[in-house]
Amino acid sequence: MRQQHAQTNRNGETTVTRELATAPEREHVELYAQNEIALGQVELVPGARLSYDDDFGSHFAPSLNLRYGFQWPMAGHFHAGVGRGYRVPNLKERYFHFDHSRLGYIVVGNPALKPEESTSTQLGVELQGQHYQLDINLFHNELRNFIVEETQAEHGFGQGITVHQYQNVERARTRGVELGATFDLAAGVLLSGGYTYLEAVDRATGQRLPQRPRHQLKTELAYQWRATQAALEFIAEGSAPAELGGPGETPAWQRWNLRFNQAVGERLTLYFGVDNLLDEHRDVTDPHDTSPLSGRLIYSGLRLRG
């Protein structure tokens, strides 16, 4: 027996979510500890996480991070880390039933999912100048039982209905580079941005993992003069495989957002903004389109601090 919930968004699109009414209660507990050890310009941070779940038992995940600060030839620091990761599948991935059948697809949970396990390493450097900050970070993750969404064979939901279900990928790898930069262009003008290149593959087949784009970009141009603040933000994401080994792709997308704040005295702030300036949104008839759903959103209001 299932419980059913329907939700309609501002575009008039309805999502039906079902969950098992008799799903068992679940207890999940985590304990985390870490210690910071300073050795001159070197800082060591060992840590450990102990988790317990009713369904999956206990798991121990240690980690070790290192940070080394320097002042020549410019100020900055190196950082490196290695650690084990562990994640149990959540209730959505195991039990929920998202009914988009009127749009041609359904997403169902998988009670047989296994927890994800990972070994992660990273290496990076941060440089700081009078008017800039630069960051670069390399990462590499080896994963077991990685949870992805796959297209399944006919499940009796009706002809023409595509069924997606969460599955484990026995061995997977993600690696890439993250770049970040901040520049003081002029008095009150700040330009910041970040870029991520990601390679995510199934180790057994060499195929790209679904819904994980190679390219992600986020930039912001901000301005502040006295009590006035304004910012223009740009977000972009590249295309990615829609499913493991399948022909479909999630399309690339981009967004422009605008924010404006005006302080009035010490306690009151007026704000105004537009999310998705160009009113671009998901094609709801395309089950592979995972770009943001909502169109242009214009909002305003005030904040009063006590």
Image (cartoon, helix red, strand yellow):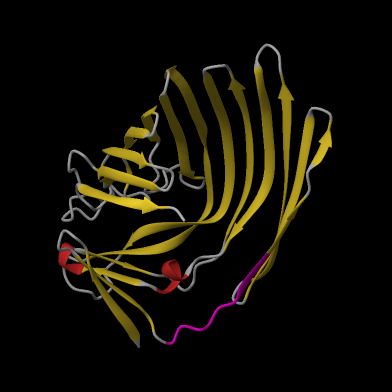
Q: Is residue 243 visible?
A: no
Q: Where's residue 180, x and y in %?
A: 49, 28
Specify the segment rendered in magenta.
Answer: 22-30
Judged left or right of residue 243, residue 183 is right
Q: Is residue 248 above or below residue 107?
A: above
Q: Where's residue 105, x and y in %?
A: 23, 64
Q: Is residue 9 visible?
A: yes
Query: Residue at the spot x=53%, y=82% of the render?
Result: 25
Q: Residue 105 colored magenta?
A: no
Quadrant into which the N terminus falls: bottom left
Q: Is residue 216 above or below residue 49?
A: above
**Residue furthest out toward the right:** 39
Query: Residue at the spot x=72%, y=33% of the render?
Result: 67
Q: Where's residue 250, x and y in %?
A: 28, 46
Q: Where's residue 101, x and y in %?
A: 20, 68
For the stretch drawn in magenta, what is the main secondary structure?
Answer: loop
Q: Is residue 151 above or below residue 193?
A: below
Picture quadrant where residue 259 is located: top left
Judged left or right of residue 297, residue 17 is right
Judged left or right of residue 236, residue 141 is right
Query: Residue at the spot x=14%, y=63% of the render?
Result: 12
Of 252 and 165, the residue lying toward us: 252
Judged left or right of residue 257, residue 90 is right
Picture quadrant where residue 285 is located: bottom left
**Residue furthest out toward the top:** 73
